Image (tube, rainbow, N blue to C red):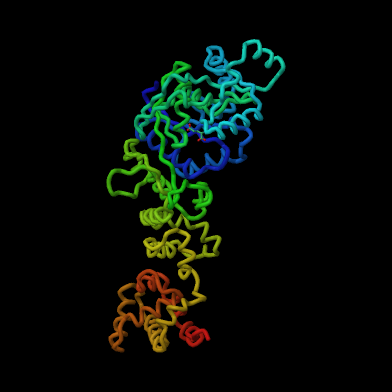
Amino acid sequence: MSDTVRVRYAPSPTGFLHIGGLRTALYNYLFARHHGGKFILRVEDTDRARFVEGAVEDFMHMLNWAGIEIDEGPGRDGPYGPYYQSQRLDLYTNHAQKLLNEGHAYYCFCSSDRLDQMRKFQEKSKLPPKYDRTCLRLSPEAIKKNLDDHIPFVLRMKVPHDSTVQFTDLIRGEVEFAGSNIDDQVLVKSDGYPTYHLANVIDDHYMKITHVIRGEEWVSSTPKHILLYRYFGWDVPQFAHLPLLLNADRSKMSKRQGDVEARAYPPKGYLTEAVVNFISLLGWNPGDEREIFTMDELIKEFSIERIHKAGAIFNIEKLNWINTQHIRRKSDEEIYNMLKSDLEKSGYSDFPKQYVMSAIGLMKERINFIHELLTFSSYFFRDPDTFDPDGVKKRMLPPAKKHLSELADRLEKLDVFQHNEIENVFRTYAEENKIKASELIHPTRLAISGVTLGPGLFDLIAVIGKETVVRRMRYVVSHFDQITKLPA
Ligand code: GLU
């Protein structure tokens, strides 16, 4: 077996990339990069009936979005391709023939009706659901006749019932299955295509995969795979089965709760860094309190030993929090560049870059999503056309009309329109009138932003600029009765 780590993400294109699939890909990638190994993408497209158009493109697109670089795979040819199973069919046929010749596989001509009946009977009699080996008892003559008569068949693996299959899972520890509990798995389907099990093992061998890191749902397939390795006389890779992803109520993460498709996250404003960081923690932790990581930090820290067995809860609030943390780590310029097309779409492209960057600087700590700069804090770009009714009721009291008017006049006269000078206007006015600064700050904030929360008022005023601030304050003064009129 290769001494360089070689791992793969091997999705079946039967749907778009699931968030759990992204985690599997990420863990494989982190493991590969941590050990200076290779990350391979293999498309397991042997189930033609369930093939979903556009799924492969979605995998590639989302892995690329997540910053998971493929070393070998579709469009990135390497020495062990092709990386689509549908292009490797001869390899599987040859190996199936070998198993047949050596007595490790057998023809099964059972019709789906017969198999259905068998399953119903097993269910009724509380027997384990397993093929009952009817066709294993066929004589060579009977087999030949069926083949000559073109009766459809599958190939099944012959599991030695008196054996046990054992392996050490890197996450779960010792795992053991009794041969008598292992089904005679179909290896080649009646359409001549291999099943997942056969193709997966053959490819992992020829692609020199050293570690198979995949979801927990595959644990029960692993003994079948190990038997196949034994039949072929191949080294068995190491296995690591990742914990299940659970909804907040600990049910299995399903379509019904939240978004399960990875592609749903970018348009909602989740940053690549945040999604990667969040997913990395679904089943793994660094062993201390740290929670915020970049991809490079994850690569450095990641180890299979720190993956836990227990199901990992997918908590969207945590993802939101991680998103804010990564927004804070970005420079104003980076955020500006990310916001540019939205600015254009909203008709705000005339605002100078420096202005937008100042607004970003003020808001970066306060937003969950970058696009909130244009929604929750639209007042950086347009005069408010509504005023928070609760705020108005509590803060826009009758004296505010005079205060706003006077303050607007004083602000207009400022030569240097910056935080300290602006603050000074407010403090001086408050002292002269023997009122608290808060009696000025709240109505002013409402007048210029329409809302009651936001960055420090003096900074906000400085960024929005004299002309706009004065205009908005005077607008409120001239429409004071209308704005403060309580609903009947
Ligand atoms: N094609 C399988 C899947 O869709 C791969 C499982 C494995 O990694 O072995 O998840």
Q: Which residue is at the front of the view, 20 or 416? A: 20
Query: Among all residues in the image, which is located at the extreme front?
Result: 125
Residue 148 appears anywhere in the view: yes
Residue 75, picture quadrant? top right
Q: Which residue is drawn at 30% across and 79% down?
A: 424
Instruction: Indicate the position of residue 293 as horizontal and vertical percent values.
Output: 35, 47
Q: Is residue 106 above or below residue 293?
A: above
Label count reads: 0
Q: Which residue is at the front of the view, 461 or 252? A: 252
Q: In this view, does 110 lie to the left or right of 70?
A: right
Residue 411, picture quadrant? bottom left
Q: In this view, does 426 lie above or below 131?
A: below
Instruction: Indicate the position of residue 304 as horizontal and vertical percent values.
Output: 35, 36
Q: Is residue 75 left or right of residue 310?
A: right
Residue 75 appears anywhere in the view: no
Q: Which residue is at the front of the view, 134 or 37? A: 134
Q: Which residue is at the front of the view, 28 or 129? A: 129
Instruction: Indicate the position of residue 368 as horizontal and vertical percent values.
Output: 42, 59
Quarter of the image with the N terminus is top left
Q: Which residue is drawn at 44% across and 47% down?
A: 246
Instruction: Indicate the position of residue 434 as horizontal and vertical percent values.
Output: 29, 88
Query: Among all residues in the image, which is located at the extreme top?
Result: 141
